[in-house]
Image (cartoon, helix red, strand yellow):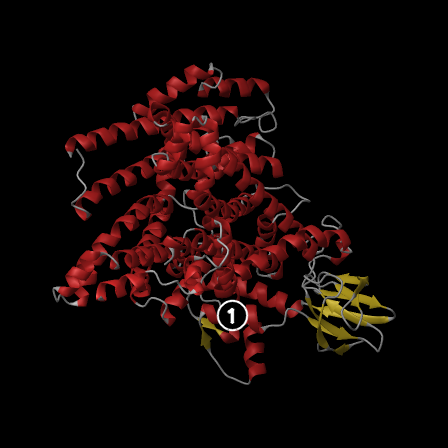
């Protein structure tokens, strides 16, 4: 087990190195630079700034400089938001994204799994049909349609929630629901399919014929075996939800980190592009690793040698 | 004696019908015929197939005979909703008043004629005077405007002293007086509610008489209203359908071709080649895809081709994995061994034997990729990286409508509805297709 974890951590570091390299060179390929002529008319000042940030050096020197700084924990200074380090910008926005993401993840896991169980146990009954229709809608309507529809209905027509920002705690309702809608629908369907699959297995019949209560059959035998594909999905899902969403932050006016990524690319803010990409990648790689380790506890048949 | 009787019975001639018991009466069905039969029985899948066909046909055909083109602007007739509340001047003249206090002459059944002549725009008194064929139309928006500026003062005072006295503010006193209620203090929320919802945006005086709306008619000129530049929303949504559908289909087909080649070769050759090819796939899929889509979109100028290229570069990975999995599970089976024994070339085995047998899951994944490509296109257009104006896609139409959502919700409603219905139809259809092509997966 220990050996396996070390191997996985090494391969995770390799993946992150790959991501840094590809992103770095792709980013430099984009035409334009952070201090293009229309923003900075004076050529002398422009050159001085280039020299200051080391942008006048050959590409491979810039690359190795970034790598060595990265290993020492120095992620650079943003070019656009002057004087702010990349860590500072990310740590300013991340709490908002984390908060909304955690609420949404909790909602998705609790509601999604319980709905899935209910549907599987009442297969083809009215409640199953109804929830499945909702789940299909939730998985197909794009998030910005849901978000704007929510804002229009609950903010401008009914006036129950604020239309912008999250100073008011009620401002969290919209973002959490909209972010959660897609994954909640997905998990509901996944849980339902998975449980229906497990319920046909022989060991469920055996458990029933032993005379165990139905509650125990489902809770202990069916659910535990049905959980594996759900955990596989939940890991990367949490990583992507917690790192924010551009659309949601734009529509609801949240100062999170989801929009940093898009705006930094549009501004050619090189250090911030690298910072956000690596932040996302590290987050994703860690959750996948955690999920793989969790498997051992959920399913004792899995042993990593 | 009994022995011979037995023998005799054995040699008795059979009845003629008994010969037919082994005959297969129904024609044998191929895999695809059988799947089609199963698909036809699935009502929701067939319904969504009809919806998809309808949307595709209207996206292709409607622009040819519609009265407007997607880029035709009529700036004087901007932001006009599909439902009009019209006022009657006399028997022949009717007007509609926009939320920007403009007066537009309309016919009785809702055809837009033109913008009325502005006689006097009294910015200080918050009044506009228009002349419609000799009739004067006065729009007085001062009550709402004054209430709004009073509310801003009220908000400021509220921060110092959180008690709102009705008697301090004229618009609140007027409102409660008209209601016949006596209220002394109210909350900030109530004050906002009265300002936003209870006070008319404007009053209309026709020839010095206060007028009430005559009736509600639907807009006959722009059936889904017009946008901020006075373009017909209907044709823009139809045109957006063209863009979204082209992106969906082309991206799915390119992904299909790349994915089938890559996955097929990787799965069939196996061993070291497979290992290297799959590590490459792992690396591509471990990178946040949106990063590469956005990066490529910035390198290639925004437009239809670059959206498709950007998506093809990154989205074939899923297809490659599915094809590889299928090929891996089949290549050890007897029919492949048989083909190899006869001396069939690798190419022939791959394209004549392996891929046709893996077609079921591939088709399902193909139909699932169409809505997901449309999703991505909408997202890109929504972030401003999609098709450039004056071209339109459903995502960019929604993005344009976002700023004015509270005033002109219809501009968001139609493209959002069209997109949701299309994606829903594709999803239901691909679910049905999966059940038909692979009945084992049916739940």
- When the figure is inspected, residue A152 is found, relative to residue A101, above or below; the finding is below
* Chain for numbered disc 1: B
Give whichever of A252, B351 is nearer the camera. Answer: B351
Q: Residue furthest right?
A: B134
Q: Is residue B38 left or right of residue B51?
A: left
Instruction: Answer whether residue B148 is visible to the viewer in this image.
Output: yes
For residue B90, above or below residue A135: below
Residue at 43%, 63% in the rendered image: A134
Q: Residues within 10 Å of mark 1 (few under 14, many from 20)?
A: some
Q: Residue at x 75, y 58 (%)?
A: B77
Extreme residue in the bottom direction: B180
Res. B266 image quadrant: top left
Residue A48, how many percent across, how many down? 51, 18
The quadrant in which residue A213 appears is bottom left
**Residue B280 point in image, percent of width and height:** 39, 28
Q: Which residue is mark 1?
A: B193
Find the residue positioned furthest to the front.
B1
Q: Is residue B215 left or right of residue B400?
A: right
The answer to whether residue A211 is above or below residue B63 is below
Q: Is residue A126 above or below residue B309?
A: below
Quarter of the rendering occupied by the N terminus of chain A: top left
Residue A89 appears at what percent x and percent y?
Answer: 39, 37
> Viewer-proximal residue, A130 or A99?
A130
Q: Quadrant of the C terminus of chain A?
A: top left
Report the residue at 59% width, 51% height from top.
B394
Q: Is residue A140 left or right of residue B177?
A: left
x and y, in percent, of residue B37 in the image: 50, 58
């Amino acid at each position: 087990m220990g050996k396996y974890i070390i191997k996985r951590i090494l391969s995770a570091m390799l993946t992150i190195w790959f991501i840094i390299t590809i992103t770095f060179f792709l980013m430099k390929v984009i035409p334009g630079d952070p201090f293009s002529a229309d923003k900075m008319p004076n050529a002398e000042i422009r050159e001085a700034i280039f020299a200051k940030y080391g942008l006048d050096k050959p590409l491979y020197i810039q690359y190795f400089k970034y790598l060595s700084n990265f290993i020492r924990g120095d992620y650079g200074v943003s070019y656009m938001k002057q004087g702010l380090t990349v860590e500072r910008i990310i740590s300013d926005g991340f709490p908002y994204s984390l908060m909304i993401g955690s609420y949404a993840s909790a909602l998705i896991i609790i509601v999604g799994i319980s709905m899935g169980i209910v549907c599987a146990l009442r297969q083809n009954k009215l409640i199953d049909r109804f929830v499945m229709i909702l789940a299909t809608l939730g998985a197909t309507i794009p998030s910005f349609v849901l978000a704007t529809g929510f804002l229009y209905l609950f903010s401008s027509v009914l006036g129950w929630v604020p239309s912008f920002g999250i100073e008011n705690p009620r401002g969290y309702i919209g973002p959490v629901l909209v972010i959660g809608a897609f994954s909640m629908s997905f998990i509901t369907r996944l849980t339902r399919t998975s449980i229906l699959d497990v319920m046909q297995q022989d060991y469920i019949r055996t458990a029933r014929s032993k005379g165990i209560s139905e509650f125990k059959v489902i809770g202990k035998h069916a659910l535990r075996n049905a959980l594996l594909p759900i955990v596989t999905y939940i890991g990367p899902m949490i990583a992507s939800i917690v790192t924010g969403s551009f659309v949601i932050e734009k529509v609801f006016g949240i100062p999170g980190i989801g929009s940093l990524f898009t705006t930094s690319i549009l501004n050619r803010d090189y250090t911030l592009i690298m910072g956000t990409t690596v932040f996302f990648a590290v987050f994703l790689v860690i959750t996948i690793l955690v999920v793989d380790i969790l498997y051992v506890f959920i399913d004792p048949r899995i042993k990593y040698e | 004696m009994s022995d011979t009787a037995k023998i005799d019975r054995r040699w008795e001639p059979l009845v003629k019908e008994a010969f037919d018991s082994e005959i297969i009466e129904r024609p044998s069905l191929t895999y695809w015929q059988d799947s089609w039969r199963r698909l036809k029985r699935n009502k929701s899948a067939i319904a969504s197939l009809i919806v998809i066909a309808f949307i595709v046909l209207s996206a292709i055909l409607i622009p040819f005979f519609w009265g407007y083109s997607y880029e035709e602007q009529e700036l004087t007739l901007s932001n006009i909703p599909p439902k009009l509340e019209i006022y009657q001047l006399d028997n022949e003249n009717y007007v509609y008043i926009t939320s920007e206090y403009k007066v537009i002459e309309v016919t009785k059944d809702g055809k837009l004629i033109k913008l009325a002549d502005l006689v006097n725009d009294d910015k200080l008194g918050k009044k506009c005077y228009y002349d419609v064929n000799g009739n004067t139309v006065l729009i007085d928006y001062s009550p709402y405007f004054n209430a709004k500026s009073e509310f801003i003062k009220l908000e400021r005072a509220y921060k110092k002293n959180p008690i709102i006295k009705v008697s301090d503010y004229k618009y609140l006193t007027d409102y409660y007086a008209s209601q016949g209620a006596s209220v002394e203090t109210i909350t900030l929320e109530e004050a906002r509610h009265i300002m936003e919802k209870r006070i008319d945006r404007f009053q209309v005086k026709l020839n010095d008489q206060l007028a009430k709306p005559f009736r509600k008619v639907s807009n006959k000129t722009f059936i889904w209203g017009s946008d901020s530049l006075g373009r017909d929303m209907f044709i823009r949504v139809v045109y957006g359908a063209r863009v979204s559908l082209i992106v969906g289909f082309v991206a799915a087909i390119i992904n299909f071709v790349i994915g089938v080649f890559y996955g097929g070769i990787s799965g069939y050759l196996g061993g070291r080649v497979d290992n290297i090819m799959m590590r490459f796939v792992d690396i591509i899929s471990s990178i946040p895809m949106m990063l590469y889509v956005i990066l490529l979109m910035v390198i290639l100028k925004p437009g239809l081709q670059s959206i498709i290229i950007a998506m093809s570069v990154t989205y074939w990975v899923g297809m490659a994995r599915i094809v590889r999995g299928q090929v891996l599970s089949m290549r050890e089976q007897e029919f492949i061994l048989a083909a190899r024994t006869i001396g069939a070339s690798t190419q022939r085995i791959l394209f004549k034997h392996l891929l046709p047998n893996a077609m079921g899951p591939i088709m399902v994944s193909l139909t699932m990729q169409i809505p997901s490509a449309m999703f991505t296109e909408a997202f890109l257009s929504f972030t401003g990286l999609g098709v450039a104006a004056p071209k339109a896609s459903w995502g960019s139409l929604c993005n344009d409508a976002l700023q004015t959502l509270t005033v002109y919700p219809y501009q968001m409603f139609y493209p959002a509805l069209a997109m949701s219905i299309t994606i829903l139809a594709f999803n239901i259809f691909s679910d049905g297709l999966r059940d038909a092509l692979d009945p084992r997966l049916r739940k």
